[in-house]
Amino acid sequence: MGRVSYLRLPHLNGDLLCFVAEDDLWLARLDSPDRAWRLTVDRAKAGHPRFSPDGRHIAYASWRGLVPEIHLVGVDGGPARQLTYWGSADTQVCGWTPDGEILAVTSHGEPFSYFTWAYKLTTDGAPGRKLPWGPVSDIQTADIAGERRSLLLTGTPPHEPASWKRYRGGAMGRLWLHGQRLLPDIGGHLGSPMFVAGRIAFLSDHEGVGNLYSCAYDGSDLRRHSDHDAFYARHASSDGTRVVYQCAGELWLVEDFAPDAVPRRLAVRLGGQRAGRRRHQVPAAQNVDGISVDETGRASAVVVRGSLYWLTHRDGPSRTITDTPGVRVRLPEMLGSTGQVAYVTDAEGEDAVEIARLPRASGVRATRRLGRGELGRVLEMVSDPLGERLAVASHDGRLLLIDVTEEGDEETEGGAVEGAAGSGNAGPEGSTGSGSAGSEGSTGSEGSTGSGDAGDSVRSTDSGGAAGSGSADSGSADSGGSAASGEAAGSGSADPEGSADSSAADSGSSADSGSSADTGDAAGSGEAADSGDAADSGSSADSGDAADTGSSADTGARRAPGARQTPGRRRTARDRRTSGARRDPGARAPRDRRTPVARRAPGTGRCRTAGSPS
């Protein structure tokens, strides 16, 4: 039984048929086309073979040097000989002249690749001669009534009609016979013009599908000679009396151009080795598509050309995890220390995540497939350190979480990733968040002022409560504060003059920041903290300033050497004047926020008054 092959680019001469299959030239007998034999083994692409008029040589294009160049080979075999060195990517053999010269088209020396000009070549390797027809796509010559005539095809794109089906633009092609245009109103894509049996034959798709047509020399008597309704007829060629062409990888022969003639399919069977289908080794290092290292660093899951392998880093054989023909896997991801690997597969058409066990001596276990048809096109995938969940980014902007544990429901959770929003986070200065209490003894300026020992200041806040109290004693100081929900606490202590004034708030009321204080009263270092307000422990209270947060400050108290300042709230808009207070040398003078204050202008050494022009 013959092998099925894709046959293309045929030509014929006498009883020999030449065509291209598996990127080589093949020959077969027309009278018994049962078995063909290989003519060339170039291991390179070949195209458009044409027999010489005497049938002894074949001119064809070969891609031995990465671009097509014209070569000549004998029908009896032997090495091929290169005739051109144009370096053009669209060089093509069109045929032969009756005098034995090769006709070809190429864009050699032209500014654009679609500007292909016609050339004549001799078989002795001499440079070709450029023909004066301008840009043409195909050319044929023949002797008609004792006169050499040229058949030209112009105005076509750089590809054949089958690559641009049913195109109806300005590049459909124009057919010329020695300067006279034929069939100007045919309205279809034209290709492969030929002189055959006293007529002009060509391919056209003006009726929807490419078929073989012919007309008289003046363009009249248009006939259709094939009836293909699914695939285009392509690459037709002639020996002057017959036409052979390809359709869907098969060869067809038209021997009669009568109106009722039909083409005949040629049953050709290839013989010999199928070099184009032979196996060959692929360097794995040059085809690595993805890699994921296990937690020990001693082995990796490696994707090579769509298959997944387990590869140890030092010794031991590589093992196959999955290698299914026609299925591509990618984005491998190790699942922690679970002995499993996850990857994306298109086994069912759409992307899905597959979980496989690593190769072990215990045998192969069945894989699990998750997220079928729900992931879209997966772009990235990462695993958590424990190997219990996968984060997947898809092409439509979604971020998905997949539970890969066997006990889980293995469902995909869509939507944006939500972070935990905690309330009451402590700021860098011991501040509290909205509606939450700061930690007891939170960081901030601690201490009390006094002429004796300096004690620690501890404060806490609670929703709806007022902050505690501080003290300044001439002997010793130990300030502590507490706040309970709905309560306010305040205390006063004796000043150096011996006078004391203490203020208290009823249960359920908060300390009034506007309460007055006698001169010399001791001030607490606590402040009022309503529900939702942040306690600001970063503000400081100087010895000479009045910081009133429900109690009063002793403006005349001196600060002990080395003692830290007592924290206080930022001043309000109230008048904080002091009367008769003695200020510590070097301390700032009390000021009123309603009066202009001297400030230093930024970036200068001068001071200016707030509210006045600089």
Image: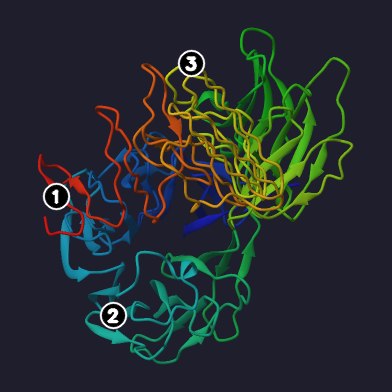
Quarter-of-image position of residue 219: bottom left
Report crowding for label 3: few under 14, some 14 to 19, many 20 or more residues within 10 A (C-alpha): some
Quarter-of-image position of residue 579: top left
Q: Is residue 367 left or right of residue 461?
A: right
- Pinpoint residue 154: horizontal percent, then vertical percent: 29, 74
Residue type highlighted by circle 2: Trp
Nearer-the-camera pick, 78 or 109:
109
Q: Secondary structure at mark 3?
A: loop
Nearer-the-camera pick, 83 or 424:
424
Q: Are marks 1 and 3 in contact (CB under 8 Å)?
A: no
Residue at (59, 70) in percent of width and height: 231
Quarter-of-image position of residue 561: top left
Residue at numbered disc 3: 453
Q: Secondary structure at mark 2?
A: strand
Nearer-the-camera pick, 545 or 73:
545
Question: What number of labels is visible?
Answer: 3
- Pinpoint residue 145: horizontal percent, then vertical percent: 27, 80
Residue at numbered disc 1: 608
Nearer-the-camera pick, 262 or 596:
596
Compared with 542, 508 (above or below) is: below
Q: Residues under labels 2 and 3: Cα distance?
A: 115 Å
Residue type highlighted by circle 3: Asp
- Pinpoint residue 127: horizontal percent, then vertical percent: 16, 48
